[in-house]
Image (tube, rainbow, N blue to C red):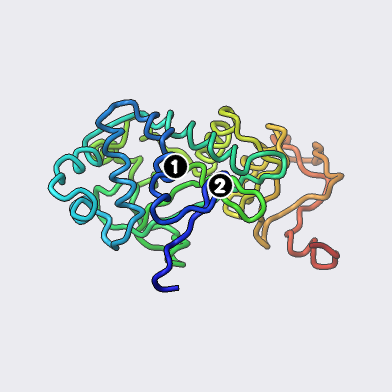
Amino acid sequence: MAGRPARRRSDDGATLGTADWEREFDRWLAPFWEALGDARRRRWAPVYVRGLLGPGDRKSVEPLAARVAPGDYGQLYHFVNAATWEGGPLERVLAEKAQALVGGPDAVLIVDDTTLPKQGRYSVGVARQCSGAAGKRANCQALVSLTLARGEVPVALALRLFLPDEWTAAPARCRAAGVPDDRIPPRTKVEIALDEVDRVRAVGVTFGCMLADAGYGASAEFRRARSARGLTWAVGITRAQTVDPADVALHWPRAATGRPRTHPAPTHEREAADDVLAGERWR
């Protein structure tokens, strides 16, 4: 209602007025600022975050600085474009926060893709690829995302940029755009996702089940890796995904003539998942 102050709630459930929420905002983010280490970074990180979350459509440094740090464009530009720090400490704080908020045996870990429409030869990872945001192939960045959720509360846990072939095949282009050398070798989205799941589990994130759509569910490597780690999981598959019955085995049939087989054959013919489920009652 016009004229009434906005209300927020803190972590302990207390109602906050407009005069209080900024203090609560600073308190909640204080562990992240501490993880940055350097005093200058701890000073400018809150300014930058306020600019990103505050009003205004343009979030590039110059218009953002005009709103939240008039007269300090140079300082904010240096923080965003020149200052460097290790991401690990920040990621550990994020994992701890997510675990405290929603982690546990009732939580689910969701692996998915996120795409950001973008142009520019030196915008890292930009290529013409499938974009969920655009609903078609388009110039964008693609990121592997992990989300920890319980009930209806999701907490973003990880984002890792995927580099398409046209980037990994051009190391000089990667270096010119600031890609570290250890990130240039090709990695599939499945490999990135597996590394991230291992990382968040190693720092204490817990969940009861892991979920992914067919983009990951179609990968036998991804499915086997989940089982090998002892995780409970459910993934989407495409209608054309071929499946084997539970009693399938491998054998070495012998032909009367010709060369000996170099690979075993399944004891049953594979079928499309859509055909197998057509006559079944299932949810």
- Amino acid type of the residue that numbered disc 2 sits on in the rendered structure: Thr
Distance in Å between CA atoms under marks 1 and 2: 12 Å
* Lateral position of residue 15 relative to residue 123, left or right: right
* Lateral position of residue 203 relative to residue 67, left or right: right
The location of residue 78, given as percent across then percent down, is 19, 38
Circles 1 and 2 in contact, beta carbons < 8 Å: no
Asked which quadrant contains residue 58, the reply is bottom left
- Amino acid type of the residue that numbered disc 1 sits on in the rendered structure: Arg
Quadrant of the snapshot with the N terminus: bottom left
| Label 1 Cα crowd, 10 Å radius (few <14 / some 14-19 / many 20+) | some
Sequence order check: which comes first, mark 1 or mark 2? Answer: 2
Look at the numbered disc 1 and give the secondary structure of its residue: strand
Does residue 64 lie above or below 258 as drawn?
Answer: below
User: Does the image show residue 53?
Assistant: yes
The residue under label 2 is: 147
Foreground tag (1 vs 2): 2
Asked which quadrant contains residue 186, the reply is top left
The location of residue 148, given as percent across then percent down, is 59, 45
The location of residue 77, given as percent across then percent down, is 19, 43
Observer-nearest of 133 and 147: 147
Residue at image point 68% right, 62% down: 239
The residue under label 1 is: 160
Q: Count the marks: how many?
A: 2
The location of residue 250, given as percent across then percent down, is 80, 39
Residue at image point 59% right, 38% down: 100
Does residue 273 lie above or below 81 as drawn?
Answer: below
